Image: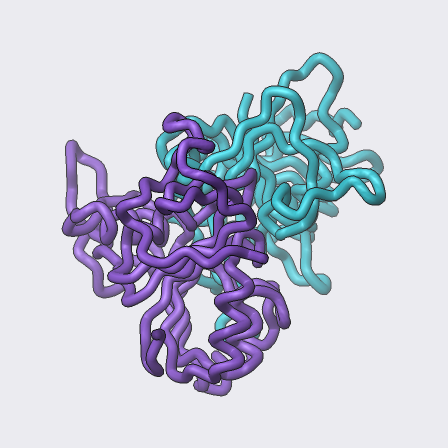
Amino acid sequence: MIPDGASLMIGGFMGVGTPERLVDEIVRQGKRDLTVIANDTARPAVGIGKLVGAKLLRKAIVSHIGLNPDTQKQMMAGAIEVELVPQGTLIERIRAGGFGLGGILTPTGVGTVVADGKRTIEVDGKSYLLETPLRANFALVHTFLADYLGNLSYALTARNFNPLIAMAADTVIVTAEHVVPVGLIAPDHVVTPAPVVDYLVANA
Amino acid sequence: MLVNLGIGIPTLVANHVPEGVNVFFQSENGLIGTGPIPEEGMAHPTLTDAGGAPVTALPGACTFDSAMSFGLIRGGHLDMTVLGGLQVDAHGRLANWMIPGKMVPGMGGAMDLVSGAKRVVIAMQHTAKGKPKIVRQCSLPLTSARPVDLVVTELAVIAFPDERATLLETAPGVTVEQILASTEAELAVPDHVRPMQL
């Protein structure tokens, strides 16, 4: 379903909350020239680190690559283009993409190299950078609970980018640790509403 | 109060909270109420810190997504952050996220933390391989245009009132002259410099 050259948002923070089964399948199929939008590239052989290790990425839009020497090496060699984005700006650009906004204004990065080539806008005497929305062809989401409709409820620190990327891609594919009957997740505990989920893969 | 700790030396701060001081630590991956490292066999795969290492959650802890986490940071809800540093300039501006051509870990949450936290404290070694880290002007890319509030090293505590590096405290057995010799930035020395209370 995912073609070569696709852009993917992938959930997880240092591999925690990453849909490992979907990552493994992409590696098995050897999909190439991928653009990944995610918090980080994890560690070698963990989560997104597997895609880096298999040299499947053309570009990574991430906040941190410090714990994956593979990514640093491929970046220095020019094999991967890495766009480093402050973490709070990255998640808001994704939120803007998923929530139908034309961008966000953030004070983060004003007066640093992050501001290069960006518009600075003053609001009530304070300077903000205009940061543009991010969207992707696919969002690969991992959740703790999903019901058969696709309502999702996440676990602890495995939530991170997952609910935001689930809003910001054309096709949303979810792996769930547990798939439960409809009604079992209380409405108040649903974090991602079912209508945004396209495919659900049980984590058997 | 709500406090966020960076990786490296700042992580050690959690071991030295005085009794009676009510602190909740935030991990920017989505946790308030981060507790100590779990005992052997008690690690939970989805309860981790910002480095992906297992932690515990204290009673009253809460978890949330990354937009909420950085809303807390950027929105002025974080009382303090303690971060590591590569360089701090004479005005208190920090560089801590890359050495061009050498080490490019990325800024992670550091730029948001320095822009948004009410109080920014840098915990770092005073020099790196004998070279001063408190410099006239940062040669490395800045983390934020906003100056930090305090720098704590093994030699000294330095603050930046009116964006001017000022010596507040000396470490036990360390003289003002030693500190000046290890500091490249011009350092104001008031009449009364306190010894560090350890």
A45 or B68: nearer the viewer? A45
Q: A10 left or right of B12?
A: left
Residue at x-position 49% and y-position 87%: A77
A85 or B52: nearer the viewer? B52
Q: Position of residue A96 (x, y in %)?
A: 23, 49
- Does any portion of residue A32 appear in the rendered image? yes
Q: A133 left or right of A40?
A: left
Residue at x-position 48% and y-position 56%: A175
Seen as rendered, the residue at the extreme top is B20
Q: Quadrant of residue A42?
A: bottom right
Q: Quadrant of residue A124?
A: top left
Q: B24 left or right of A57?
A: right
Q: A7 left or right of B173?
A: left
- Does any portion of residue A72 appear in the rendered image? no
Q: Position of residue B115 (x, y in %)?
A: 39, 41
Q: Position of residue A50 (x, y in %)?
A: 57, 73
Residue at x-position 69% and y-position 35%: B56
In the image, residue B172 sits, relative to residue A27, either above or below, namely above
Residue at x-position 82% and y-position 44%: B41
Chain A drawing hue: purple
B77 or A15: nearer the viewer? A15
Q: How many marks?
A: 0
- As drawn, the chain in cyan is B
Q: Position of residue B102 (x, y in %)?
A: 56, 75
For the C terminus of chain B, the image quarter is top right
The colour scheme of the drawn protein is by chain
For the N terminus of chain B, the image quarter is top right
